[in-house]
Image: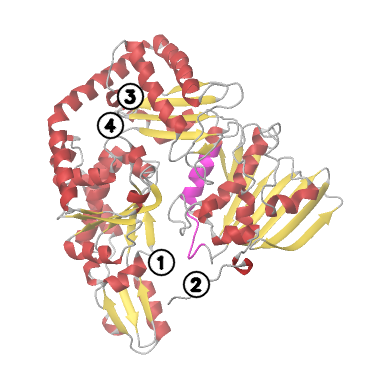
Amino acid sequence: MNKETKYTEDNIRSLDWKEHIRMRPGMYIGKLGDGSSADDGIYILIKEVLDNCIDEFVMGAGKTIEISIQGTKVIVRDYGRGIPLGKVVDVVSKMNTGGKYDSRAFKKSVGLNGVGTKAVNALSTYFRVESTRDGKSAAAEFSQGNLTDQEFLEETSRRRGTKVSFVPDEIIFKNYKYRMEYVTKMIMNYVYLNPGLTIVFNGEKFISKNGLKDLLSDTIKEDDRLYDIIHLRGEDIEIALTHSRTQYSEEYHSFVNGQHTTQGGTHQAAYREAIVKTIREFFGKNYEASDIRKSIVTAISIKVMEPVFESQTKTKLGSTDMGGDLPTVRTYINDFLKTKLDNYLHRNTDVAEKIQRKILQAERERKELSGIRKLAKDRAKKASLHNKKLRDCRVHLTDAKNPRNLESSLFITEGDSASGSITKSRDVNTQAVFSLRGKPLNCYNMSKKIVYENEEFNLLQSALNIEESMEDLRYNNIVIATDADVDGMHIRLLIITFFLQFFPELIKEGHLYILQTPLFRVRNKKETIYCYSEQERKDAITKLSGKPEITRFKGLGEISPDEFVHFIGEDIRLDPVMLDKEKSIEELLSFYMGKNTPDRQEFIIDNLKVELDMIEEDI
């Protein structure tokens, strides 16, 4: 007979604020990660501090923000009003404490929950906040949320404002490092949304004069724009839009109160609807929504009173109302476009004609593809039923309302042995596996028709659920997992070409990664070290001394599932695929995947890195 579990007062435990944040960090900053993804927690920590600085700028206090990242230490300094000196400790260590509850002071603030800097404090081994105002200053230092020191100065010549310094806790964020490209992108979004603001990052100045028009100018090259960027502004709304000459799918950049809503939300859905409605009414034609929006590249920013987001990380807007006496988000955006975009098209008939020709071209292509698409979808459904290509993860079954879970990943592998190793090692809750058969087709310069006619591409597109819109993407991370040899590198390049050709925004939005797996295993009877480079192999041999056993992994299939679990678990190493903003996608594809040229041959020779299977002197 089983003993009954006792449930008494002793079983009830109350966590203080910092214990709860450290025990459940995901509730406050989303996923943790090691810095390889733009939405990893270490970047959310910077964003939480920056949001407060931006709110000061919006309120007309402080036009410059300085950011410094040296190693793991982050310093953020604004020249706003400064935290009231008697509340310096409270605002960073007492939950539900802050100035943003007073809507008179922060009517359209980014952060409303009084949580941001508390989370940064609790998740840092070192956290210091300094405030200067009215010729006086106060400072406080913490470690993991515990107050360690306080300072008060009666007089100071320092400029007013707030300075926050912190070092993320390696217990929470394991083996992390900051990738400056992600920080730079975050900073650029802030300046696009706040013309007149200057952000100085590690000595480099970032500033925007034309808001979202500058964002689109940096996103799509001039020779790929079908027409000049349309830029429209209202009191609480700003949009910029154009169509791409070469891109197939839609691309949206959406923001609420200065917050980059990477997963969209009610405002983005309303904007997509409003574009279609306005265009239909302007031309007096009931065009298909997909034909109108095909190849669109656009950005929208709105300001909402006390916005409601679907998580603390604020990546998706849930609010349906603008707040105050304003109408719903949907009505507000629709009315704005109905007036402003319609007026623009009437005044710029050449742009209207280009848009109509683009719609008619999309319509012809859609009709030409209709039969092929139906057959392709039927094939994809049959393949899914027989589970030949995709081994899905459980999160999609338990969270059907939100198709893209931040923790979900799809590994794209080649060959049965590699896919078998990953399938047996994966976390079945969040990690899915898609198995390629042989080398994919080089689809450079091919039309979208090839995606439906080629079984591998068709099934991959179906697995990702990205045919209609990136909003429907089923996996937050798409990870290319191929062998670290010439064939594996070639397959990797062909997969990247597929995404660049047909779904470039998937790369632009930071969803595509390369899985790094060890090249060597060095071990003796007491310890095993996995090495990802020749230098790491040499260091491991030195550390283990003597003559340790050295294994060179020639392919993913050679790594046993028991070992593979380490390489796709907590210790996973991912390299994000990033675009060179100085080069257009066409330039990249032409150079790497076009006809062979002396320039490319020279590039390959100069950058070729040969890993020897065996180093005789060390064996």
| Alpha carbon separation for disc pair 4 and 3 | 9 Å
- Residue pointed to by mark 1: 571
Foreground disc of the pair 2, 1 = 2
**Relative depth, front residue between 478 and 545:** 478
- The kind of residue tagged 1 is Asp
In primary-sequence order, the first of circles 3 and 1 is 3
Seen in the picture, residue 522 relative to 243 is either above or below; the reply is: below
- The kind of residue tagged 2 is Glu
- Residue pointed to by mark 4: 246
Say if the magenta span includes residue 167.
no
**Label at residue 437:** none
- The kind of residue tagged 3 is Leu
- Residue pointed to by mark 3: 226
**Relative depth, front residue between 244 and 97:** 97
Residue at figure coordinates x 51%, y 33% from the top left: 319
Q: Residues within 10 Å of mark 4 (few under 14, many from 20)?
A: some
Does dot 4 land on a helix, a strand or a loop? loop
> Please, which residue is most extreme toward the bottom here?
546
| Alpha carbon separation for disc pair 3 and 2 | 72 Å
